[in-house]
Amino acid sequence: MIDSPPALSFREVSHRYGKTPSVAGISFDLAPGEILCLLGPSGCGKTTLLRLASGLEVPDRGEILMNGRKVAQAGRGVAPDKRPIAMVFQDYALFPHLNVLQNIVFGLSRIEPTERYRRAREVLAQVGLAAEKDRFPHTLSGGQQQRVALARAVALRPAVMLMDEPFSNLDANLRFSVREETRRILQEEGTATVLVTHDSDEATQLADRILLMERGGVVQEGIPDDFLFRPVNPFTARFFGETHSLRGSVEGGVLHTVLGSWPVGEGREVREGPVEVIFREQAFQFREPLPDGPRHPSFQARVLDSRPIGGRRMTRFRVVPTGESEPDGPILRASHRLTTPVPPGETVPCWIDPQLVFPFAKG
């Protein structure tokens, strides 16, 4: 049995706008059916990679292949309409004078008319909009418009789907469910997808694999859990959720901080000496010991404020010094279980989950 070639391959691709480098020496493969997320802050090069894949830009160096066929190399490339791609952008670009069914059929001009309508109805059913086929775009909600745009792109059966911040125009309370629906549809179709976003929650919810970018290069590549539990540097750790940073040191494989001391942990190699210690807000839990409690460090915390936010409880606290002569400890925040009340003014035990604590050597 012969393995299928990658749906999309970048081979040492570099690009610049004028004298300004946008991406530098990027290489990756996208497997058939895989969802790959290009994640990073504005200006990191992720949208440029998407434009290179689409044919809207050509590389200065390197090669781009789709299904094993070269579509771009230094200074030239195959036109976008000649590539086996479909695109979904922030602006869904639905035709206002066409109804939902007609919007999808419009993009299927390469196939027989009878097959166009059959395929259009099929994908509308898949996205749960079969009953809305005669409605016009302005009568649909934002979530429904996004699903029509997705159905139109999926109907083409592209080798590669390219999506640029497709959920950014949706209300916050819609994004989770629409993203879930999008992932289901892409998986059912087996569509290889490249998604550009600056939202780490979006990336972890949708992606099979993530490329985190900064300044035109890839900082870390892996599955979502790699970024949450195994960040390679402080930038990566901070990009995935709210964190706190404290000074510390590593001596003899033990991490020392103002919150206590505990072993660095298996699989984490940190040079001895001063370190920056990054704590995820989820690392702190109150009152009830974590599993295997005796192995988890703890300290005393004076609660300053505690309120429910987004399905979790956000508690702000001050670390209580261990000795009377010691100065007050730092003020930190914990994101913990909604059902664990911690009244302001109380001093309570706080446990630390070392899996969510990351020491990085300084210098």
Image: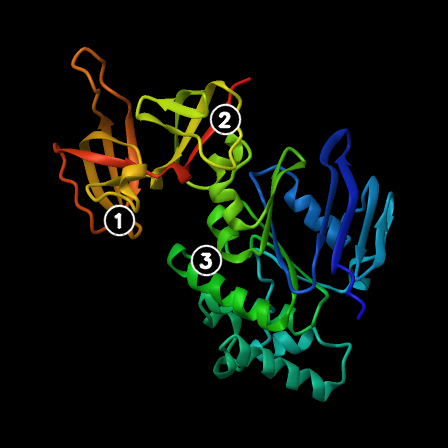
Please give the name of the residue rendered at 85% of the width and 55% of the height, measured from the top-left corner: 70
Residue 96 visible in this rendered orientation of the protein: no
* Upstream in sequence: badge 2 or badge 1: 1
Residue 121 visible in this rendered orientation of the protein: yes
* Label drawn at residue 337: 1
Q: Nearer the viewer, residue 129 or 329?
A: 329
Measure the C-alpha gap from mark 1 to mark 3: 28 Å
| 125 lies above or below 75 | below
- The percent position of residue 117, horizontal first and vertical second, equals 65, 85
Please give the name of the residue rendered at 28% of the width and 23% of the height, measured from the top-left corner: 330
- The percent position of residue 35, horizontal first and vertical second, equals 61, 58
Q: Nearer the viewer, residue 338 or 271?
A: 271
**Residue count near mark 1 (Cα–Cα under 10 Å), binned few <14, some 14–19, many ≥20:** some
Q: Secondary structure at mark 3?
A: loop
Amino acid at the residue labelled 1: Arg
Q: Disc 3 marks which residue?
A: 170
Q: Are marks 2 and 1 in contact (CB under 8 Å)?
A: no
Q: State left or right for residue 42 relative to residue 72.
A: left
**Residue count near mark 2 (Cα–Cα under 10 Å), binned few <14, some 14–19, many ≥20:** many
Circle 1 or circle 3, nearest the eye: 1
Q: Secondary structure at mark 1?
A: loop
